[in-house]
Amino acid sequence: MSPRTPQQLEQIRKERRKAITDTALEVFAEHGYESASISKIAKKAGVSKGLMYNYFESKEDLLTSIMMEGMGEMLQMFDTDKDGILTREEFTCFIEDIFSLMSAKRSFYKLYFALIMQPSVWKLFESKLPGMIEPIIKTMVDYYRKKGVKDPVLEAALVGALLDGVGFHYVYKADLYPLEEMKKIIIERFV
Amino acid sequence: MSPRTPQQLEQIRKERRKAITDTALEVFAEHGYESASISKIAKKAGVSKGLMYNYFESKEDLLTSIMMEGMGEMLQMFDTDKDGILTREEFTCFIEDIFSLMSAKRSFYKLYFALIMQPSVWKLFESKLPGMIEPIIKTMVDYYRKKGVKDPVLEAALVGALLDGVGFHYVYKADLYPLEEMKKIIIERFV
Amino acid sequence: MSPRTPQQLEQIRKERRKAITDTALEVFAEHGYESASISKIAKKAGVSKGLMYNYFESKEDLLTSIMMEGMGEMLQMFDTDKDGILTREEFTCFIEDIFSLMSAKRSFYKLYFALIMQPSVWKLFESKLPGMIEPIIKTMVDYYRKKGVKDPVLEAALVGALLDGVGFHYVYKADLYPLEEMKKIIIERFV
Amino acid sequence: MSPRTPQQLEQIRKERRKAITDTALEVFAEHGYESASISKIAKKAGVSKGLMYNYFESKEDLLTSIMMEGMGEMLQMFDTDKDGILTREEFTCFIEDIFSLMSAKRSFYKLYFALIMQPSVWKLFESKLPGMIEPIIKTMVDYYRKKGVKDPVLEAALVGALLDGVGFHYVYKADLYPLEEMKKIIIERFV
DNA sequence: AATGAATGAGGATTCATTCAT
DNA sequence: TATGAATGAATCCTCATTCAT
C-alpha cells in the first residue's frame, strides 16, 4: 500500500550492498579482476545482473569501493592512539594485530596482492595506498628509534619486507602455512 | 632463389618464436594476462595473428611457455653443485646471488611478479612452482640444520619470506630502494 | 487531516500528468525518443519511476499522448473562424501565428520533426497529421485564389515548403536564427 | 597455400564494406539510428556481428562514415569552379543542379533527412555540416550581393530554407510532388 | 609457412517494466 | 496513490580461434 519507509529502504540497501561486496571480494580474489565477470558475481550473490548497477556505477566502481572500504577497515585496526611512547607490550600487540588481520581478512589480502601487481589496476590505487601503509611504517620506525637501534629506518624496512613476504606466502600457500610459528619467531626476534 | 635449407628454416623459426615470446612477455606484464590480446601481441611482434597459432597452440600455451622458459633460466643460476657441506662463505655467496638476480634481472623479475600474482595465471603454475623453488628452500634448510638452528625449516621459511618481501618492495619501489644495505643486514643477521 | 475531496484528487492528477508530459517533451526533444529514459524523465519531473506507469501505460503511450495533445493545441490556434473572406491583415496575422508557434513551441516542433522522419514512428501519426496540416494549407490556397494568383495551389505549396524549411532551420540553429527578419521578409513577399 | 594478394584483399574489403554500408543506410533510415541494432544490420548484410567491427570502429563510426561519404558525393556535384563572377545563367544552372540532386539521390536524401533530425545523430554532425554546406550558402550570398539585393545573407537563408523545405516535402510526398513546377517558379522568383 | 577475413561466444552495461510494500 | 528495488532482455563491443587462400 504505502511505500517503504526510508529506514526500511536504507536497511535493504545496506544488506544487499554487503551481499554484493562480500561476494565480489571472493570472486575477484579467486579469479582476478578481469576474469571475474559481473554475471558470475551477480549469480553467486543471488542477485540479478541489473541490480549490480543499482548499487555500483561500474565494475571498476565495484572494485574500488571494495578496496577503499577494506583499506579503511584495516586502517581502523591501527587507529589506537600511538602518539606517546610505544612500549614493548604495545609493539607486540601491534605485530599480533597484523597477523590477526592476515588471517581474518585473507581474501582481502589476496585481492590486494593480486591487484597491486596489475599495472592497469595499480593506477587506481597508487595514490591512496601509501597513505594506508605509512602509519604502519612510522609506528615501527618510532619504536626502533626509541629502542636505540642503529638504523631504525632500515630496521623497519626489513620488518616491513618480512611481513609482506609472510603475508604473500600465507595468502598463496593457503592453509599449509605455519602462521602462528612465524608470528612467534618474529615477535621474538624483532620486538 | 633456391629453397632455404632445413637449418635456415630452423633458425628462422627460432628467431620468430623468440620475437613472439619477448613481445608477449612485455604485453602480458603491461596489460595483464586477460587484457593482453593476441592481436596486440601479434602486431607488436610484427607477425600475423594466424601465425601465432603456428607457434603456440593457444593463448594459454603462449603464457605457460614463456613462464616455464623464464623460470628455467632463473633456476639455472642456482645450479652450481651444492651437495656437499655448505660453508658460511658459500651461503653468503648464495644470498648475494639472489640479490644479484634481483638487480640484474629486475625488469624480468617484475614481469614475473606481475604475472604470478594474477590468480588466473597462478593456477597454471601452482603445481609446478614448488618443484622449481624447492632446491632453493632445501639449500637454506640444510644450511640452518648444519648450523644447529633450533627449527631450520621455520628459519628457512622466515628468510624465504624476507627475500620475497625485499624482492617485492624492490621491484615496486624502483630506484629508491636500499638494496645494498638490505643485503648487508640480511647477511649479517641470517648467515 | 481529512482525506482530499475527489475534486482535489482530480486536480492533483491533472497537475502531475502535466508535469510529466512537459518534462517528457523536453527530454524527448533533447535526447530523442530512444535515448530518453523513463528514469531521467521521472527524476526531472520529480516523480518516481513507478508512478509514471500510473499515468501512462508505456513509454510509447507517453510519446503518443504528448504528440496528440501537442497537435491538438496547435490546431486550436488556427481554429478561429476563417470561412469568410480572408483580408490581407488576417493573412498577416495568420503567418505571424505560425511564427509565434515556432518559438513558443520549439521543443514540440523539434520532437515533431524528429519523429516525423522516423518511418517506424511515422506510422503512429500519419493518419492524424494530414488533418492537422490541411486547414493551414487550405487557408493559404484560399487566400491566393482570392488574391488572383495564377497558380494558388503551387503558391501555397511554395509558402508551405518555405515555412517548413524555416521551422527546420530555426529548430536546429537554435538561438542564432534570424526568425524575426525571416518573418518580416516572408510577410513582405508572400502576403 | 600462399596468402591472398593485397589486391585480392583490397577487393574483398571493398565489396564487404559496401555491402555493410548499403545495408546500414537502409536500416538506419528505416528504424532510426538508436533503434537500428548492429545485430540487425549484420544479419541483413549477411555478415557476422564481429565482422562489423573489422570494418568500422563502432556504430557511431559506421554512421558517420556513411554520412560523410554520401555528403561528399553530393558536394562533388557542386565542385565546378565558381570562383569568378556568377552570371544569371550559372545561378540557374546551380539551382537546377540542386533539383537534379533531389531526384537523382532521392533515397540518400531521404536517409539524410531521417538521420539528421534525430538529436543523437545531429550532435555528431553539427560541427562538420557547416563546413560542407558553407560553399553552397556562399555561392548564393555572393550572387545576391552582386545582384544588389538589400540583405543578401537573409535572401540566401530564405532560399536555403525554401530548398530544404521543398526537399523535405518532395522526399515525403514521393511521386505526387510537383518538383518541376516548383523548380520553375523558384528560378523565376529567386534567380 | 603465412595471411587476415570471418566467426560467435561472452563481457559490461542500459533500461522499460513489474511488484512488494 | 506512491515508491524504488529488482528483473532480464537487449545493446554495443572484444577477442581467441578457425580457415580459405
Image (cartoon, coloured by chain):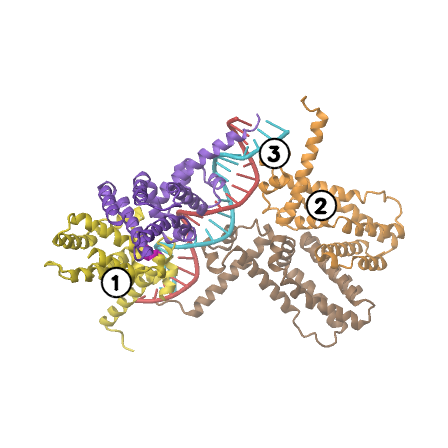
Chain colours: A brown, B orange, C yellow, D purple, E cyan, F red
Percent position (x, y) of residue C25?
32, 60
Residue B129, disc:
2
For the point 77% across and 51% down, which residue is it?
Answer: B103
- As helix, strand or loop, the secondary structure at mark 2 comes to helix
- Place residue D95 in its image quadrant: top left
Quadrant of the rendering where the N terminus of chain B is positioned: top right
- Place residue B16 in its image quadrant: top right
Q: CA distance from mark 3 to mark 2?
A: 30 Å
Do circles 2 and 1 both sit on a common chain? no
- As helix, strand or loop, the secondary structure at mark 1 comes to helix
Give the residue type that dot 1 points to. Ser
Circle 1 is placed at which residue position?
C100
Comes first in the chain, label 3 or label 2: 3
User: What range is drawn magenta here?
Assistant: C168-172
Give the residue type that dot 2 points to. Leu
- As helix, strand or loop, the secondary structure at mark 3 comes to helix
- Of marks 2 and 1, the one in the foreground: 1
Q: Is residue B47 visible?
A: yes
Compared with D154, D81 (above or below) is above
Percent position (x, y) of residue A145?
79, 71
Q: CA distance from mark 2 to mark 1?
A: 80 Å
Q: Main secondary structure of the magenta part?
A: helix
Residue D52 painted magenta: no
Percent position (x, y) of residue C142?
14, 53
Mark 2 — on which chain does it sit? Answer: B
How packed is label 2: few (under 14 Cα within 10 Å), some, or many (20 or more)?
few
Give the residue type that dot 3 points to. Leu
Quadrant of the rendering where the C terminus of chain B is positioned: bottom right
Circle 3 is placed at which residue position?
B51
Q: Nearer the viewer, residue D9 or C177?
A: C177
Q: Is residue C60 visible?
A: no
